[in-house]
Every structure is written in C-alpha cells, then in structure tokens.
Amino acid sequence: MTTSREIRLLTPADAPVFRDIRLDGLRQNPHAFLATFELENAMPISRFEERTLTSSVFGAFVDGELLGVAGYRQQDGVKESHKAILWGMYVRPKGRNRGLGQDLIEAIVAHASGSIEQLKLVVTSGNEPAHRLYRRLGFSEYGREIRALKHDGRYFDDILMVRFLAAG
Ligand SMILES: CC(C)(COP(=O)(O)OP(=O)(O)OC[C@H]1O[C@@H](n2cnc3c(N)ncnc32)[C@H](O)[C@@H]1OP(=O)(O)O)[C@@H](O)C(=O)NCCC(=O)NCCS
C-alpha cells in the first residue's frame, strides 16, 4: 500500500492539530523540552495560532495525519538576526525511524538558507536519538550548559549545537 507523505509549513488553521501533537510530545518526552505539558495544556488555542506566525513551523503529514513537527525562529535584534533557533522537534512514536525527523530539518534548512546564516538548537544530554539526528545532519556542538534544567529533582545538561548555512 502506498502512503502519501508531505512536509509543509503550518498556518493558523492548523492550530488544533499542532496543539495536539505538541501536547503529545510534552507528555511523552517531558525531558526533551523546556516547556511543560501543564503549562501548554492551559494555553488558549490562540497561542498556537500565534506560534505559526512568529515562527516557521513545519509539519510532516503521512496520509493526512500530522506525525511530526519542528520550527525555527529568527532571533530578534539587528545584530543577531542572521541567526535562528530550531525548536519543538517532535515525531510521534509511530512515525519514527522512517526519515520524518530528517525531512523536517531539511525543510527548515532549505527554507532558512539565504536569509539565515546559523541555525542553532539545544538538546538535552542523554537524548541520543535527537543528538544523533542533529550530528548526522551537520550540526556540531559548540558548548554545554551544565545543570541547565531541573525537573522533578533531577538536573540535565544542555548541549548547544549549530549548523552554518550558506549566506544569502
Ligand atoms: C529525535 C526524533 C525527532 C527523531 O525523529 P525520527 O523521525 O525518528 O528521525 P529519523 O527517522 O530521521 O531518524 C531516526 C533514525 O531512523 C533511521 N531511519 C531513517 N529512515 C529510515 C528508514 N526508511 N528505514 C529505517 N531507518 C530509517 C535514521 O538513520 C536514524 O537512525 P539512528 O537513530 O540510528 O541514527 C524523535 O525520536 C523524537 O521525536 N524524539 C522525542 C522528542 C525529542 O527528543 N525531540 C528533540 C528535542 S531536542
């Protein structure tokens, strides 16, 4: 059976499915994200609509179902606008290990190239699947924040990574 696969930018009209997958990620992988399920579950839908406008958020759809998301946001400020932060990378468990994570990053790189020179991200130490994905796709480590997060009494280090893109 053939499956249809599409990577595209989300719009405010996608807010309900975006909210659903985002909350799924926060619930399933609480240590992978800075935000918490409780915080975002309490947010009105308008906050998710807004995010599709203040960031470029890509969705990976398989047979019309949103199975993965990742976004990037250009940094504020004249002297930092050549950089962007990649955030919110999440693929539902049933969509993993078939290249959706890679496709999402490649879509972001293609969209950002020309206007953004550095794509930066943060990955929690010990999150090997994500760390491997980023290394494989050309991100390199430039720093580490020790005990960056404290959750349920446990500390987590943040690994800071960057990929340099072709300048416009
Ligand atoms: C990290 C994450 C986004 C990766 O998503 P994914 O869609 O599984 O990523 P990919 O499929 O592109 O790559 C994953 C693996 O599948 C393999 N793969 C890709 N396509 C494949 C295929 N067609 N057949 C078999 N394996 C395949 C890749 O080589 C990779 O292998 P590796 O882990 O041994 O290096 C996902 O695991 C996730 O959402 N994790 C929880 C949230 C999280 O940690 N987010 C990151 C926060 S920084």
Image (spheres, rainbow, N blue to C red):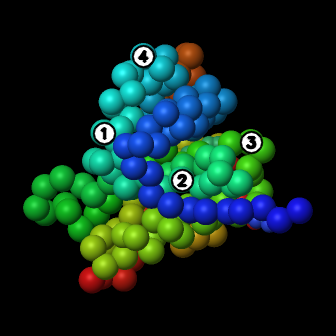
What's the amino acid at mark 1?
A: Glu
Q: Pointers 2 and 3 in contact (CB under 8 A)? A: no
- Disc 3 crowd, CA 10 A, few/some/many (<14, 14-19, 20+): few
Question: Under tag 4, what secondary structure?
Answer: loop
At x 89%, y 62%, the residue is 1
User: Answer yes or no: do the residues labelled 1 and 2 have beta carbons within 8 Å?
Assistant: no
Image spot of residue 18 (x, y percent) = 50, 39
* Residue 153 showing in the rendered view: yes
Q: What residue sits right under mark 4 in the picture?
A: 42
Q: Is residue 15 left or right of residue 82?
A: right
Judge the density around disc 4: few (<14), some (14-19), many (≥20) Cα neighbours within 10 Å.
few
Which mark is first along the chain, 1 or 4?
4
Q: Amino acid at mark 3?
A: Pro
Q: Contact (CB < 8 A) between labels 4 and 1?
A: no
* Residue plotted at (44% across, 51% down): 10
Q: Position of residue 151 (x, y in %)?
A: 52, 22
Q: Determine the CA span between mark 2 and mark 3.
A: 15 Å
Disc 1 designates what residue? 50
Vertical position of residue 63 compared to residue 48: above or below: below
